[in-house]
């Protein structure tokens, strides 16, 4: 058969991701902070976009100041105004009090409801000194020469969040161009600073500093500090033999060790606490079901200023200006639609989660059902990847607490009685309850836990699965737990 060139027509379907479609997909997996940062950048870039503050303004205007009832005495300033005199003539002790109350009332009023700038609530929060500032004030009194103070400041800069000195003293001496002996001398002086234990290089040194300052560092206690590995393994018998101590000595020393702070720097951690704000709420509905509601406080609301577009476009004569306005209008329209679609998708997925996890919402984690991305995706008629993106970095407030949406997707473990499968998270919760409630004189082995789960709860789980879940939750083996609980009982 001879080969010759020819033209053929073929019809096929392909999926092409446009830049806007890719951006819409990206919006689904953004967290609240990331989404707000993206929206702020678009607001600066696009003159046709602006925030929709109408609902916020309406919400602020719902509550009005309460009027005094008949017979109720008003403020001293109001009475003085009626009588056309000064407050000091009627109530000398009242001078200055009304202005203070007015300042408090202004804190309660919405911004812009009175003339002048609204005070920021952050300005009334007492600032916490950082660990570096607290130590700098102390070394200024402890160290006499400027050279020593410079070394002290360098040591402060080398502390980690726990208050430990992680820097190499030799490298620090080279950097500061001083002798290593000078570094060690300053270190010995500043190790007496508050909080006790800072500037330690290891955990034993941190505990030793605290015990020395309390005058509790006797030879037996020093021996215990040198053998913290035995204490970590709860090898009390080994410690007694090594130190020549009896049960009372060990109990007393363990009590002193528990009173120490192994991470002294955390007491002066001035970093703000990150508060998780829910993206969606699940509340009991009137018909016995669940009401799913988006958190409007964190949901960005944008509108397209078409009036401004019409006004500016009339004066745009050059092709580049018209193209810029057209692109801005297209981008603004796309962004508003994408944000609305993102909100609707989150709402649909969360509603399906609430429906499938009805038992969890009513009774807790023991009734958490096995659920996969595919189960939710099929129910809401979207792709699994869409559900995965929607549930990433999103949090939901439920009657059982605040959870990440990913929390509800767990694998299934079979039922010993042939009934419904059990969620892996529910099994972990049951294992945790059994371990925390076990008798110190009768510690449960992994085999015993697996047998209890099968006989009493109908959960078919293997011993190695119990061991895997137990280790993931931070519980030691039965031998380690026996030593730990006996030492606690002795203490």
Image: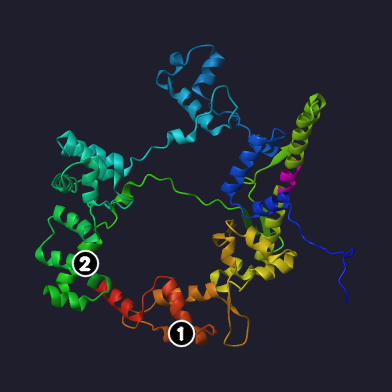
Dot 2 crowding, Cα within 10 Å, few <14, some 14–19, many 20+:
some
The residue drawn where x is 65% and y is 65% is 353
Seen in the image, is 228 located left or right of residue 296?
left
Q: 281 or 153, which lies in front?
A: 153
Q: Please provide the residue range marked out in magenta.
A: 333-338
Seen in the image, is 36 located left or right of residue 485?
right
Q: Where is residue 75 in the image (x, y as percent from the top left)?
A: 51, 24
Q: Nearer the viewer, mark 1 or mark 2?
A: 1
Seen in the image, is 150 located left or right of residue 309?
left
Disc 2, SS: helix
The residue drawn where x is 54% and y is 15% is 81
Q: Position of residue 94 (x, y in %)?
A: 43, 22
Cα–Cα span, label 1 and label 2: 34 Å
Q: Position of residue 368 (x, y in %)?
A: 58, 71
Quadrant of image for the N terminus: bottom right
Dot 1 crowding, Cα within 10 Å, few <14, some 14–19, many 20+:
some
SS majority, magenta: helix
- The single residue placed furthest to the front in the displayed view is 2
Quarter where residue 443 is shown: bottom left
- Give the vertical position of 90 relative to 223 (above or below): above
The residue drawn where x is 43% and y is 15% is 88
Q: 488 or 473, which lies in front?
A: 473
Q: 128 or 111, which lies in front?
A: 128
Kindly tell me whether residue 195 is visible in this rendering. no
* Residue designated by label 1: 463
- Give the vertical position of 482 relative to 100 (above or below): below
* Residue designated by label 2: 254
Q: Where is residue 201 in the image (x, y as percent from the top left)?
A: 24, 55
In this figure, what is the number of numbered marks? 2
Q: Do the residues labelled 1 and 2 touch (CB within 8 Å)?
A: no
Disc 1, SS: helix
């Amino acid at each position: 058969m001879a080969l010759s060139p020819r033209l053929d027509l073929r019809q096929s379907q392909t999926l092409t991701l446009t830049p806007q479609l890719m951006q819409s997909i990206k919006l689904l997996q953004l967290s609240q902070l990331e989404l707000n940062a993206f929206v702020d950048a678009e607001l600066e870039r696009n003159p046709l976009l602006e925030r929709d503050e109408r609902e916020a303004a309406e919400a602020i205007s719902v509550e009005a100041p309460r009027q005094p009832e008949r017979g109720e005495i008003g403020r001293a300033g109001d009475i003085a105004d009626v009588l056309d005199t000064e407050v000091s003539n009627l109530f000398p002790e009242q001078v200055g009090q009304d202005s203070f109350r007015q300042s408090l009332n202004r804190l309660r009023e919405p911004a812009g409801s009175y003339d002048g700038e609204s005070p920021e609530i952050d300005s009334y929060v007492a600032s916490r000194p950082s660990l570096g500032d607290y130590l700098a004030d102390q070394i200024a009194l402890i160290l006499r020469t400027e050279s020593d103070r410079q070394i002290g400041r360098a040591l402060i800069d080398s502390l980690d969040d726990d208050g430990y000195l992680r820097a190499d003293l030799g490298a620090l001496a080279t950097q500061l161009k001083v002798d290593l002996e000078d570094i060690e001398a300053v270190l010995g002086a500043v190790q007496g600073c508050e909080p006790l234990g800072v500037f330690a290089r290891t955990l034993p040194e941190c505990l030793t500093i605290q015990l020395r300052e309390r005058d509790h560092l006797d030879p037996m206690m020093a021996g215990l500090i040198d053998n913290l590995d035995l204490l970590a393994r709860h090898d009390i018998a080994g410690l007694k033999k090594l130190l020549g101590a009896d049960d009372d000595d060990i109990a007393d020393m363990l009590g002193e060790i528990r009173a120490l702070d192994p991470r002294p720097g955390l007491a002066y951690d001035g970093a703000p606490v990150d508060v998780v704000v829910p993206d969606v709420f699940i509340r009991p509905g009137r018909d016995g079901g669940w009401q799913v509601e988006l958190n409007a406080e964190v949901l960005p609301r944008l509108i397209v200023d078409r009036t401004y577009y019409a006004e500016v476009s009339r004066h745009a004569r050059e092709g580049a200006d018209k193209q810029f306005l057209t692109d801005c209008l297209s981008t603004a329209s796309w962004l508003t639609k994408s944000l609305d679609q993102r909100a609707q998708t989150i709402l649909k997925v969360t509603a399906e989660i609430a429906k499938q996890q009805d038992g969890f919402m009513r009774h807790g984690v023991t009734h958490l059902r096995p659920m996969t991305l595919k189960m939710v995706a099929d129910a809401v008629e979207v792709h699994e990847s869409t559900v995965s993106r929607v549930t990433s970095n999103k949090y939901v407030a439920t009657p059982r607490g605040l959870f990440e949406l990913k929390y509800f997707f767990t694998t299934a473990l079979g039922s010993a009685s042939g009934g419904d499968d059990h969620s892996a998270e529910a099994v972990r919760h049951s294992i945790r309850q059994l371990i925390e409630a076990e008798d110190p004189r009768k510690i449960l082995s992994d085999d015993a836990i697996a047998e209890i789960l099968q006989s009493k709860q109908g959960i078919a789980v293997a011993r190695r699965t119990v061991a895997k879940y137990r280790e993931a939750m931070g519980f030691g083996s039965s031998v380690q737990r026996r030593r730990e609980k006996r030492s606690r009982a002795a203490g």
